[in-house]
Amino acid sequence: MSYIATSERQLLLTAEISAVRSKPAFGETLCRIASAFGFKHITLMDAPSPDSLLLKPLLIETSLPTAYINQFDRARFMQLPLFSSGVSDSVLPRVWNLSDANCVFPLELQTLKYAFDMQVGIAIPCRSLDGTRLLFWMAGNRAPLGQMEVNELMMIMLHALEAYNQVSSTKGGDYPALSAREREVVRWTAQGKTSIEIGQILSLSDHTVNAYMTSAIKKLDCVNRTQLVAKAIRLKLIT
């Protein structure tokens, strides 16, 4: 695997980030950042707290496969102390390497990460303009990160955070309101319920639940349920 020289890579990426003016462009730029450092996956998410139960509602932008997210949440890995307390309180980047004897991930989580080529990764904490605690993290099958790369990534992600703040501040009030029923459906989805389960709770058919979900996805300009839940939480449409 070849890597661009550090100075050239940082210059190119920061120039691209500074040109971001829309949410789709922001997501595409994140993926290019990951690729430039030899990573396969990249995510921007709300930092987990002791009350966090699932990964899916925390996601803001991600290239993670749906299968990984579903398996992670079915195993309730978000409730592990290393996520619910350690990550959310840290102000420093954290790196991981599954081949390291001191790796803190339990065996089941290591197995899942190996299955999706996440042997090496980094999590970089930050805060949005409104004070919300966020995490950028990248993972892939590459050589362990050196300190120079960690420092470079921290600088680049500061620019990415600024781009995210700008995109969020200009887009936040442009979405039509969700109906009360749409909010209910999205809220239960955030709790990990399926359409059939939500239908049973609300006394609706699963087809009707899916119709409300589709309407909410269109209103908030999302592409899937995962993105919808994350955006609804970020816009404080649900709690």
Image (cartoon, grey):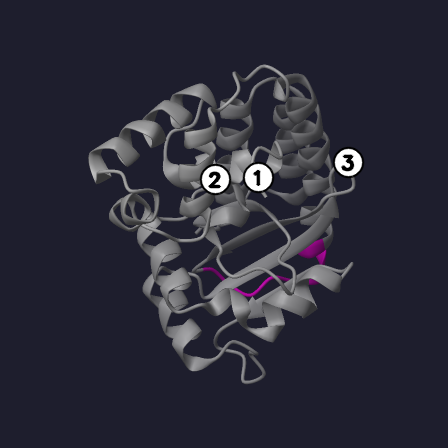
Amino acid carrying mark 3 in the image: Asp
Q: Is residue 123 visible?
A: yes
Which region of the structure is painted magenta? Answer: 142-150
Residue 156 drawn at (x, y percent): 69, 40
Q: Which residue is mark 1?
A: 233
Amino acid at dot 1: Ile
Task: State the residue position of label 2.
Answer: 229
Find numbered disc 3 in the image and state the secondary structure of the residue it sits on.
loop
Q: Which residue is mark 3?
A: 130
Distance from the alpha carbon under mark 1 to that under mark 3: 14 Å
Does residue 149 belong to the magenta stretch? yes
Q: Which residue occupies 33% across, 46% down?
A: 198
Residue reaching furthest to the bottom: 101
- In this view of the protein, which residue sits in the foreground, 142 or 186? 186
| Residue drawn where x is 54% and y is 17% of the image | 175
122 lies above or below 217? below
Q: Is residue 169 left or right of residue 4?
A: right
